[in-house]
Amino acid sequence: MRQRGLPLERVRERLEARGIRISLATLSYWQRGRSQPERAQSLRAVDALEDILALPTGALRSLLGPHRPRGRAVCELQDLSASQRVFGENSTVEQALGAAFAHFNEDLCSVVIRETLRLDERRCIRSTSVHQVLRATRDGASRLTVVHCIDDTSAESIDVVVRCGKPGSVRFLPELRCIIIEVLLGRELARNETAVIDYEVLLGPSNVPSTHHERRTRVHLREYLLHVYFHPDALPAGCHRYYREQIGGEKRNSRRIALDVSHSAHMLPIRCPAGVHGMSWEWPAD
């Protein structure tokens, strides 16, 4: 709209001329990313805007994220079907956990997840810091199990530091390229009680460049932030955020992300439904 020199009031008038009534406040929220069109009338407005702005059909609709669930978000018991909807059949996570996959963190659900990745001059992830707010889905929840995938099993060292919570067992499964991390909460939670954990996975030098990071969630998150720092001597040619309904599924809502002055890129989805939220980056040709 800025490129076309159209103020919001003029856009609203053009929509009204087509029989579509949208308030200025709603248009402003859409423009600033504070909300997105979801109802039938709103989607009609999006289609009309493509015509008003002389954009290709579907140009604006392709930018819309998944619909937000209506009503208050509730943390429910996470059963096997919830896991399989996101992880799929015979996933790396299922293979890593074996029979325990059927009860994978069934008494906890994530509410907020914030991740920070740091890459080195070899284009490899050297650290992944995770800050997570959890809610108990029933009485007695006392530990979180994390299956953390890595790019290179031959990294010189692998270490896990728990800063909030208590470290439990750590198992490295090189054949599956993953680490199983247990974070103890220190006590048993009552149903609906929350807990905060904070941990970091530190990897030694590697020769396998990283190209993406994905966060899998079985529930709608209140907030998900992924922040990736690149080494100033190894900057990507481009970064994109995307969403999948399931591991290995088709990428949807792909959108380019710009690097900032700190050589970092971040994503903070307006809506964060169950599924796979990821960021990928491409390296320039040597």
Image: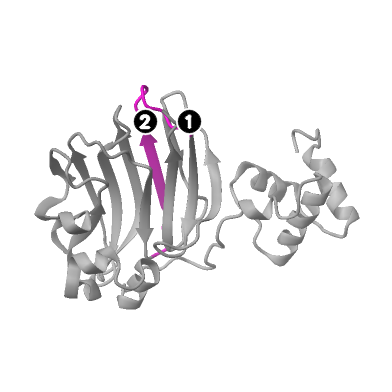
248 vs 42, left or right, is: left
Quarter holding the N terminus is top right
Name the residue located 86 percent from the left edge and 54 percent from the top edge. 16
Tag 2 residue: 230
Task: State the count of labels.
Answer: 2
Q: Assign a secondary structure to mark 2.
A: loop
Name the residue located 44 percent from the left edge and 40 percent from the top edge. 281
6 vs 221, left or right, is: right
Tell me if residue 249 can be seen: yes
- Main SS, magenta residues: loop
Question: Of the residues shown, which amino acid type is indicated by label 2?
Answer: Phe
Q: CA distance from mark 2 to mark 1?
A: 9 Å
Q: Nearer the viewer, residue 166 or 242?
A: 242
141 vs 42, left or right, is: left
Q: Position of residue 221 (x, y in %)?
A: 41, 58
Give the colour scheme of this rendering: one colour
Q: Verify whether residue 160 appears in magenta.
A: no
